Image: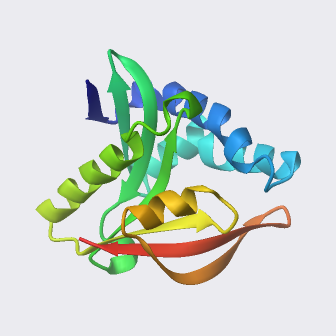
């Protein structure tokens, strides 16, 4: 049985391991290896993850089965001063994709969001990422395109998607 658990700091290495395996598969055909390395360090170094939790108020959750980590998500309540929850990250080990784990993580976030009267989920997805279809199947709609400069001359070229809850 798959369980979704709240983050604890002991899971930083678990989060990093999932990202290290999934990112090259998800983004290898979209981004250069130099940009992948830059973004991995920028988003998934231990100091960055600590900053996300402690300063930026990101909440991490992990999906597990028999104590094996399957994937994770992170999110932020009241994003940009609104009643929206921003889903910052959601990644599932490739070997476990297609089992409904991503949906379980989003369902968990939705349940938590409803408890504090949040009215929508919002997320960014790379315009060339196949996960776009996953989000559309779950009821997310495209609201705009967004290019985000992340330093070192790199851009994140995303769609912003939302889903009312």
- Horizontally, residue 49 falls left or right of residue 23, namely left
Q: Residue furthest top?
A: 66
Q: Is residue 58 visible?
A: no
Query: Residue 11's quadrant in the figure?
Result: top left
Q: Is residue 141 above or below residue 24?
A: below
Front-lying residue, 131 or 90: 131
Point 37% across, 71% down: residue: 79
- Horizontally, residue 142 falls left or right of residue 40, namely left
Q: Position of residue 155 (x, y in %)?
A: 76, 68
In the picture, the quarter occupied by the N terminus is: top left
In the picture, the quarter occupied by the C terminus is: bottom left
Point 54% across, 32% down: residue: 93
Q: Residue furthest bottom?
A: 144
Total count of labels: 0
Q: Is residue 108 above or below residue 63?
A: below
Q: Tell me how the rendering is colored.
A: rainbow
Q: Position of residue 62 (x, y in %)?
A: 37, 35
Q: Position of residue 50 (x, y in %)?
A: 49, 42
Point 28% across, 34% down: residue: 5
Q: Is residue 128 above or below residue 100?
A: below
Q: Is residue 152 above or below residue 83?
A: above
Q: Position of residue 16 (x, y in %)?
A: 58, 32
Q: Is residue 62 visible?
A: yes
Query: Residue 75's quadrant in the figure?
Result: bottom left
Point 77% across, 64% down: residue: 151
Query: Residue 30's quadrant in the figure?
Result: bottom right
């Amino acid at each position: 049985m798959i369980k979704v658990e709240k983050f604890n700091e002991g899971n930083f290495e678990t989060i990093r391991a999932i990202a290290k395996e999934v990112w090259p598969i998800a983004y290898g055909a979209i981004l250069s290896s130099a940009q992948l390395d830059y973004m991995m360090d920028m988003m998934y170094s231990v100091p960055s993850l600590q900053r996300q939790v402690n300063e930026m108020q990101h909440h991490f959750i992990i999906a597990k089965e028999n104590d094996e980590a399957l994937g994770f998500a992170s999110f932020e309540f009241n994003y940009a001063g609104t009643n929206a929850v921003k889903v910052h990250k959601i990644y599932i080990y490739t070997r476990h994709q297609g089992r409904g784990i991503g949906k379980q993580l989003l369902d968990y976030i939705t349940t938590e969001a409803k408890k504090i009267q949040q009215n929508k989920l919002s997320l960014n997805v790379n315009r060339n990422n196949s996960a776009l279809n996953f989000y559309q199947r779950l009821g997310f709609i495209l609201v705009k395109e967004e290019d985000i400069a992340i330093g070192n001359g790199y851009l994140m070229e995303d769609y912003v998607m939302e889903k009312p809850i």
